[in-house]
Amino acid sequence: MSSGGIFDLPRRERELSELEARAAEPTLWDDPVSAQKIMQRLAAAKAGVEPYYALTQRAEDAQTLIEMAEAEGEAQAYAAELKIEITALRAGIEALENATLLSGSYDSNDAILEIKPGAGGTDACDFGAMLLRMYLRWAEKKGFNATIHDELPGEVAGISSATVFISGPNAYGMLKAEHGVHRVVRISPFNAAGKRQTAFVGVEVLPRIEDAGEVAIDEKDIKMDVYRASGAGGQHVNKTSSAVRLTHLPTNIVVTCQNERSQLQNREVAMQVLRSKLAEVQAREEEKKIALLRGEQRNIEWGSQIRSYVFQPYTMVKDLRSGIAIGDVQSVMDGELERLQLGYLRWLAGKGGEGGGEDID
């Protein structure tokens, strides 16, 4: 699938029909885990076609109103009702267009979000914590489930890294807009002279791959190191070697996890992250488009940012890809990200890359 294509109703209907047939099989619940996944996919498939059916019905109702008005010669009597229907149709068409922007191979998956401060020292670590809060607030507003699976504190303030699993409809599809380097400009709370400081944080977004069969990993290709966890986390921290570091030898991808209570749990979480990273690599190789899932990888420093957050001397958040700018920086930091995310998706689909985007006060 493409990341922005046409609303492919026949394909969606075929997928729905296949899933309904599987859900009706008498042996479905012999494997509860598999059954639950099928039911989740079925719900998502229904959600993918029902808006189209509802919009078609609304259009037919509006057409009926127009025909009635013409037949009775009473256009004015139906004007108010028609205005309501046309307004609803426009909103429905916009929602359906947004849905077409989320038709990528992994867009419907849950997401794994990794936050890594870069240039800027303590300010970068503090900004990393601000971004972590922003994404947690975004998930809360969307009704999504967000779980921090790995978080390391900064030496002075903020965080030195964090990994969050976010579950919800099209979580990855929306959050892939966040992948890249984020830049902040503000009066540094860590600078005694009160000077403006620029800092950078890298955000990596991966589709969560839970099906082990979807991405095969040979155990011989994995090197596992264990060590004692550090930072806050309860009595198990620094008592046993429960933290896990996995290295995938063929690709040299390294994944760590230390927030779970046992070595086994940490390994399971690390394997999920590794599987997602390998799925991303495979997708890039298959589709020959580096930017499709991961985007260009750059240093977390000046000149490589995808979005800027300016707190002084004025306030603005601007996405440097779509050109969308929002003057209310605090609302963005409180999780209001949808305009930026949809703007990126339209830009990615070739719909929003013209000119400088839109400025929003």
Image (cartoon, helix red, strand yellow):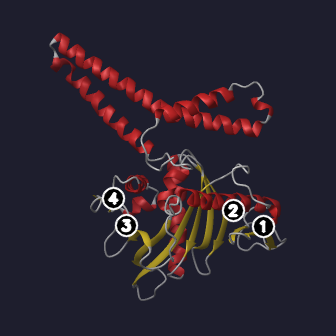
Q: Residue at x 61, y 33 (%)?
A: 42
Give the distance between the C-alpha atoms of the residues marked 1 and 3, in whole angstroms: 38 Å
Give the distance between the C-alpha atoms of the residues marked 4 and 2, in whole angstroms: 33 Å
Please report whichever mark, 4 or 3, sits nearer to the chain's N-terminal start: 3
Residue 280: horizontal and vertical position, in percent? 60, 59
Please report whichever mark, 1 or 2, sits nearer to the chain's N-terminal start: 1
Work out whether residue 3 or residue 39 is closer to the camera in this orientation and state it: 3
Q: Check residue 320 in the rendering and tell me which mark sits there, or answer none.
A: 3
Q: Quadrant of residue 350?
A: bottom left
Q: Name the residue type under label 2.
A: Leu
Q: Name the residue type under label 3.
A: Leu
Give the distance between the C-alpha atoms of the residues marked 2 and 3, in whole angstroms: 30 Å
Image position of 209 (left or right of 318)? right
Q: Which residue is mark 2?
A: 274
Q: Name the residue type under label 1.
A: Ile
**Do we see residue 286 in this rendering?**
yes
Q: Residue at x 50, y 61 (%)?
A: 289
- The nearer-to-camera label among 1 and 3 is 1
Residue 296: horizontal and vertical position, in percent? 49, 68
Other-residue count near label 2 (Cα within 10 Å), few / some / many at <14 / 14–19 / ≥20:
many
Image position of 209 (left or right of 80)? right
Please report whichever mark, 1 or 3, sits nearer to the chain's N-terminal start: 1
The reply to whether the C-beta atoms of the residues labelled 2 and 3 are less than 8 Å apart is no
Q: Name the residue type under label 4.
A: Gly
**Placement of 50 over or under 256, stated as above or below:** above
